[in-house]
Amino acid sequence: VAAATAWLAHVRRTDTFQAAAGAQGFRQRTGETLVRPAGEPIDGDFALESLERCEVYLLSSSRVLWIRGLDRCTVFAVPTRGAVYVTECTDCTLYLGARQLRIHTSKAVDSYIHTASHPVIEHCSRLRFAPYPPLPPPL
């Protein structure tokens, strides 16, 4: 049992959470300020993937928000109608509101959240949580 436990501790955990093909989003950017303006359609999914040292402002909601592979980023997102999936993020600050929040294989993430259900957190370390800030009336 001890050998199996030691082996499992060294196995790299990966998740299969991935945005649907064709989902709008910001991908493979470094050191940029990225803005999704208010008033865009909210019926589809939106993805943030492979971002490094970026500031992201999502001022339009979406059905589902997929966040994967962010490093040293700050993300402010108005609340989504459905779920937010966060995977493989490191040293980030996230402002997220959603019906459901799932965080997997991430570390050193500060999250300001509001969810309708309990968040699901798996295979993470050094996470900190605080309440989602109040939104100004136009948002």
Image (spheres, rainbow, N blue to C red):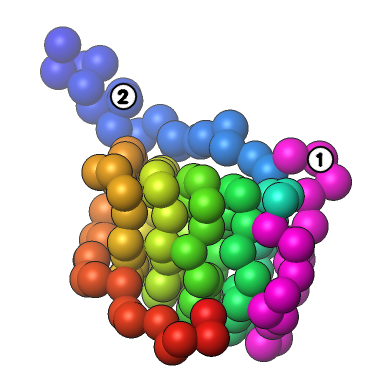
The part of the chain drawn in magenta is 20-42
Which type of secondary structure does the marked residue at label 2 adopt? Answer: helix
Q: Is residue 39 magenta?
A: yes
Residue at 25% in and 43% down: 118
Report x, y in % for residue 38: 67, 79
Query: Disc 2 marks which amino acid?
Result: Trp
Q: Residue furthest front?
A: 137
Report x, y in % for residue 27: 75, 63
Q: Is residue 49 magenta?
A: no
> Which of labels 2 and 1 is toward the front?
1
Give 26 or 90, whichever is nearer the viewer: 26
Identify the residue under disc 2.
7
Q: Quadrant of the N terminus?
A: top left
Choose the circle earlier in sequence order: 2 or 1.
Answer: 2
Report x, y in % for residue 14: 51, 36
Identify the residue under disc 1.
21
Which type of secondary structure does the marked residue at label 1 adopt? Answer: loop
Report x, y in % for residue 94: 42, 70
Q: Residue furthest top?
A: 1
Residue at 71% in and 51% down: 43
96 horizontally vs 62: left or right: left
Residue at 79% in and 57% down: 24
